[in-house]
Amino acid sequence: MVNLLEGKNIVIMGVANHRSIAWGIAQSLSKAGANLIFTYQGERLRDNVAKLTEELERESLLINCDVTKDEEVEAAFAEIKEKVGVIHGLAHCIAFAKTEELEGEFVNTSRDGYALAQDISAYSLVAVARAARPLMTEGASIVTMTYLGGERVVPNYNVMGVAKAALDASVRYLASDLGKENIRVNAISAGPIRTLAAKGIRNFNSVLKEIEERAPLRRTIDQSEVGDTALFLMSHLSRGITGEIIHVDAGYSIMGK
Ligand SMILES: NC(=O)c1ccc[n+]([C@@H]2O[C@H](COP(=O)([O-])OP(=O)(O)OC[C@H]3O[C@@H](n4cnc5c(N)ncnc54)[C@H](O)[C@@H]3O)[C@@H](O)[C@H]2O)c1
Ligand SMILES: Cc1c(CN(C)C(=O)CCc2cnc3c(c2)CCC(=O)N3)oc2ccccc12
């Protein structure tokens, strides 16, 4: 693979463990020559991320950032500015909703549960884009992770679906604002992958089985396929694309009932 990202500084937000989609993205970008900066949610995750990044070719910067705290977002990007100066890309792989609100009827969603899902899974992209913008002086590519449940009803996805719908619209409005500075904003809509964010999801196995039976490619997708699409979106090859949602789901989302 030609080194598509040689000399590029890219921020990756949302590595929790080796199954994280953010880690799949990190591996693809690292292989393409990128210098990576990782942000993680609180010190208890730092060791996980540190251990994982030891296997990468180049040394990585590790920075704490809980996206629910404006001061931590500002501090994180102040430290990134001080240590690397310019950034050429950012991968936002962050979401959260209360477990109990990811099953049963959506109509029972609580006010605070709805707000929490919106805050972490959608507003955080706006906050991060605003903080990263001054560092993106040479143009950049912002990539976030979305899911079909924001476009159509996926049973039990509930409050997270509404958050993804907000995320998808935020991608378009951010693309509109930032395009004049040659900052592109896109989303990857990934098919279901067994990560920590799939833990405790009621009958996740049947969600995966349905994909294997009905997706055009008759299989599920993995973190490396998302990683390679992120590489495309971070690189010059996607320079004409912004405000877009690219489905990496074995074609599942094109199928009717
Ligand atoms: N796994 C799937 O099936 C799937 C499919 C499509 C999209 N996605 C999306 O991919 C993204 C990554 O999820 P994943 O599947 O890799 O699971 P994951 O649990 O590995 O990643 C989620 C990350 O969000 C971080 N996070 C949660 N709250 C945070 C906060 N307040 N501040 C900072 N970070 C916080 C967690 O620390 C974790 O690293 C999410 O946006 C998810 O919605 C996942
Ligand atoms: C696919 C799929 C996923 C994976 N996906 C696309 C997601 O976006 C998962 C996001 C997520 C957000 N918050 C939490 C959890 C996962 C589980 C642990 C927790 O306590 N909170 O989640 C589903 C929930 C119901 C149905 C399908 C799915």
Image (tube, grey):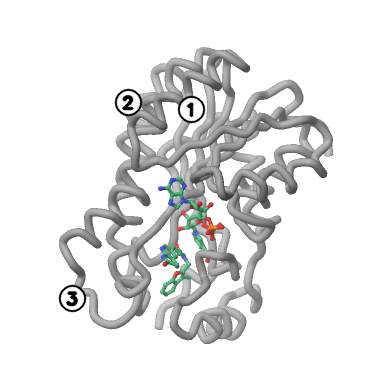
- Horizontal and vertical percent for residue 80? 55, 21
Residue identified by numbered label 2: 177
Residue identified by numbered label 3: 108
- Horizontal and vertical percent for residue 178? 38, 24
Residue toward you, 77 or 192: 77
Q: Is residue 5 left or right of residue 93?
A: right
Do labels 1 and 2 touch, CB within 8 Å? no
Do labels 2 and 3 touch, CB within 8 Å? no
Name the kind of residue labelled 1 in the image. Answer: Ala
The numbered disc on residue 76 is 1
Q: In this view, does 160 lie to the left or right of 110?
A: right
Residue toward you, 208 or 101: 101
Q: How far apart are marks 1 and 2 (CA)?
A: 23 Å
Q: Is residue 168 visible from the viewing direction of this image?
A: no
| Above or below: residue 53 compared with residue 2 | below
Q: Is residue 237 visible from the viewing direction of this image?
A: yes
- Horizontal and vertical percent for residue 13? 53, 41
Q: How far apart are marks 2 and 3 (CA)?
A: 35 Å
| Above or below: residue 215 compared with residue 47 | below
Element at label 3? helix
